[in-house]
Amino acid sequence: MSENFLNSLNESQKIAAQHIDGSLLILAGAGSGKTKTITTRLAYLISIGIDPSSILTLTFTNKAATEMRERAYAMIDSSSVNTPPLLCTFHKFGLLFLKFHMSELNRKNSFIIIDNDDKKRILKTIDKEITTSLLVSEISKYKNTLLTPSEAKIAAQLKLYQQIADIYEKYEAYLLKNNLVDFDDLLLLPYLILEKNEELAKQTSQRYQFIMVDEYQDTNELQYKLLRKLCTTHNNLCVVGDDDQSIYGWRGATIKNILNFADNFKDTKIVKLEENYRSTDTILEHANQLIEHNRDRLGKKLIGTREKGESVKVYESSDENEETRKIIDDITKLVARGESARNIAILFRVNALSRSLEEGFNRAGINYRLIGGMKFYERAEIKDLIAYFRLLTNSTDNFSLKRVANKPKRGIGKTTLDKLDDLSNETKKPIFNILEEYSPEELSTIVGKKNSRTLKVFIASIMDLRDMLEESKMRFLDSFEETFDYRASFDNVPDGFDRQGNIDEFYGYIRDFFIQNPHLNLEDFLNEIALESEQSELTDQAVSMMSIHSSKGLEYKHLFVIGLEEGFFPIIGDGSDIEEERRLGYVALTRAMDTLTLSFVHSRFYKGKRATLLKSRFLSESGLIKGSLTIEKQSSYKKGDLVQHKIFGMGRVQKAEKAGKDFKLTINFGGQRRDILSSFVEKI
Ligand code: ATP
Ligand code: MG
């Protein structure tokens, strides 16, 4: 038996990897090798002759599953594995299960999975009044807490929630009739089947003798229940997690799953891992300091194993453009030094913040990849606005007209738009012109009286806005909002904060464009951004940008976290939870291996105007800013460092002595030695 791969583990990791029978909880902080341990455990189980097809490993993302499979296979002779172990996300597992057992619910296994967009469209056909995103999130909540439509009706107190429960019932009927399943069904239906059929639960549990779950802190009640069903006949469940990294509370994930694990599964062995192998000591120290501000935690030790490393940098900028410039400068230097772009990542708490970065990266010609989120211009609300602006500059754009005719909702349905589309094809006239030229009476005969009136008003508004655009480009966006209330349509919507953030970003960008280019018009702007989105292609050699949520489990040699301002990170107020925000901070900081840079600005475009911002409390909580105003030296200096001085040019540090916040440096500028304070030079 060759188990050399076990030698790359420390003692506690080895114990965990070699644990075979009975439940196992690996509870440990970031970068302590939890994922590595279960990956090795998977290889170990196979290496001692356990049938690979009896091992089920569940991960949070597809990417994590792929990586784990590759790593586990690299440890063993994968050619000897006939039936591979099942390694996938919870949702994928649910799908595979349903393919075999959907008939238990008297449904065919030829069902189709619908995505969030489809879901919204279906909900829109059922109800046009209640905001779709609210319906989406409420229905998802019901499903994840196993609430049937009739139970939801009984539970509903407010009229709004009675309506939502009604819509939920209709929605479920629609899915059933058309044999569709949504993402939540992929967890819910397997559970219902196993709940109903005890024999099948036993069989399934016997089939998967060994079950492992990564990122257990982010599982919800339904996932826990499903796992219990899978453990009907055994107790061989191994989960790994970190209570300090629980960041999906808002989606129903519950830390209870970790806290109660040992009570729920008898004779649980608990293994704690206390060494961090990922980050330099300096980075770890700041991450630990930050998370210590949370009360609601189990409290774990996490000791560094690496050298001290470079200081964490804090960038202070006047606005997002300066912030982007600094980061691009740093990245350019890293890449020039031979660093691969794929080792570099930028994280943000609020998605809207990626816009100025994307823009800067496009301009600088740096490849980037926006992970786990759509590119800025692919987001629905931005696509809507672009469609509006296209229609404003081009009457023949039927597609854009159809996209926005009912946004925000004004009662224009698909049937009406289809009729107009047909007429447009027949008459070879753009819909816009039809709506403009036909008399209200003529139009009524095609789309009905009410729609005719609505569409006439819509067209008149577009024409007014065209005039406005001629008159004053700077006033135009205000008039646009006054006319259509597009931004306001996301008020009090669950993901409204992010969407309005994106809209504000976009408006800010347009205003900037007009200020910078007074002679250019809206059409020029549209052309410019069309090119921009073309350029943003996927490549492997790319810097990664993502939300902190998408970064869990990942690691990068060089990491930047932007937007450390109160309100952006942490998000404050309505429904936000400061402890969860802080855990997000901890997740962010612990993604970094070698260097970490945090950035805050004094102002950003926000809610349609430039907002003055205060730096995030997380900067002082993590010990990066002492007192309230001073920023710790951006970097330390040592003999041999190359520096640049505005007047004396490039030089090499001969001697460095700490002098207050600064360093007193003796620098050799091409043979000339000078003593200079570090704040007057830039490190190269
Ligand atoms: P997270 O909580 O962020 O998901 P994790 O606990 O899953 O982190 P891993 O991603 O498994 O941690 O490991 C972090 C890094 O440390 C990886 O680069 C891994 O290869 C390395 N590592 C883990 N254990 C060891 C070890 N015993 N010796 C050397 N390197 C290790
Ligand atoms: Mg991990």
Image: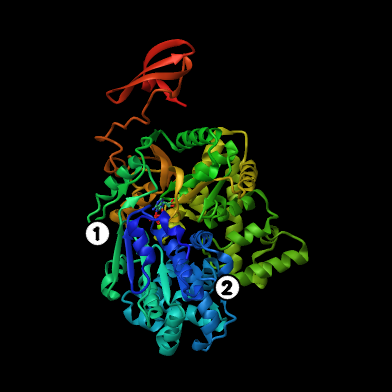
Ligand 1 within 8 angstroms of badge 2 C-beta:
no
Kindly tell me whether residue 220 is visible in this rendering.
yes
Q: Quadrant of residue 45?
A: bottom left
Residue 77, image x and y in percent? 55, 64
Q: Quadrant of residue 652?
A: top left
Badge 2 density bin: few <14, some 14–19, many ≥20, Cα 10 Å: few
Gap in angstroms between the C-alphas marked 2 and 1: 42 Å
When the figure is inspected, residue 578 is found, relative to residue 89, above or below; the finding is above
Ligand 1 within 8 angstroms of badge 1 C-beta:
no
As drawn, the label of residue 489 is none
Kindly tell me whether residue 251 is visible in this rendering.
no
Residue in the image at 58% along x and 50% along y: 464
| Front in this rendered view, residue 81 or 126 | 81
When the figure is inspected, residue 72 is found, relative to residue 104, above or below; the finding is above
Instruction: Give the structural element (helix, strand or loop) at label 2.
Output: loop
| Front in this rendered view, residue 259 or 130 | 259
Q: Nearer the viewer, mark 2 or mark 1?
A: 2
Badge 1 density bin: few <14, some 14–19, many ≥20, Cα 10 Å: few
| Front in this rendered view, residue 517 or 86 | 86
Residue located beneath label 2 in the image: 82
When the figure is inspected, residue 135 is found, relative to residue 641, above or below; the finding is below
First in sequence: mark 2 vs mark 1 = 2
Q: Is residue 187 left or right of residue 154?
A: right
Residue located beneath label 1 in the image: 298
